[in-house]
Image (cartoon, rainbow, N blue to C red):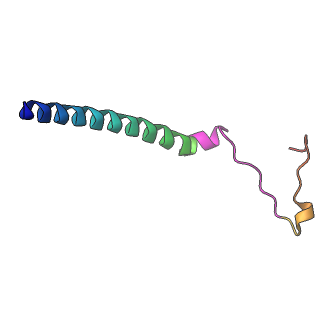
Amino acid sequence: MEIGAFFLLVIVLVVVAVLGGGVYLIAAKHRREDLSLEAEESGQDKRPVHHEVENEEQNTDFVGTR
């Protein structure tokens, strides 16, 4: 009885590890695609425009100015 419970525990741990590894690999693949140069060059998820300003009053973007 004890050996059967241990065997089931090992099987459950292996299944959880395989599923977790699969999720991790899928997330890593998508992250690599998001950070790739091709995605940046094609215009996906453009980064916000940064402005160098002399004081805080100049640090304002108005609607329609982009």
Magenta stretch, residue numbers? 39-52
Question: Is 49 in the magenta?
Answer: yes
Count of marks placed on residues: 0
Across and down, in percent, residue 3 comes to 7, 34
Q: Residue at x 22, y 35 (%)?
A: 14
* In the rendered image, the vertical position of residue 58 relative to residue 41, given as above or below: below
Q: Position of residue 16 (x, y in %)?
A: 29, 34
Which quadrant of the structure image shows residue 64?
top right
- Where is residue 59 drawn, in percent x and y? 87, 59
Q: Of 64 and 18, which appears nearest the observer? A: 18
Q: Quadrant of residue 39?
A: top right
Of residue 10 and residue 33, the one placed in the foreground of this image is: 10
> Where residue 57 appears, x then y in whole percent?
92, 63
For this view, does 55 lie left or right of residue 46?
right
The vertical placement of 61 against 52, above or below, is: above
Quarter holding the C terminus? top right
- Horizontal side, residue 33 vs residue 57: left or right: left
Q: Is residue 41 above or below residue 58?
A: above
Between 35 and 37, the one lying in front of the other is 35
On whether residue 14 falls in the magenta region, the answer is no
**Which residue extends farthest bottom?**
54
Going by the image, does 43 lie left or right of 23? right
Name the magenta segment's main secondary structure. loop
In the rendered view of the protein, which quadrant contains the N terminus?
top left
Q: Residue at x 28, y 38 (%)?
A: 17
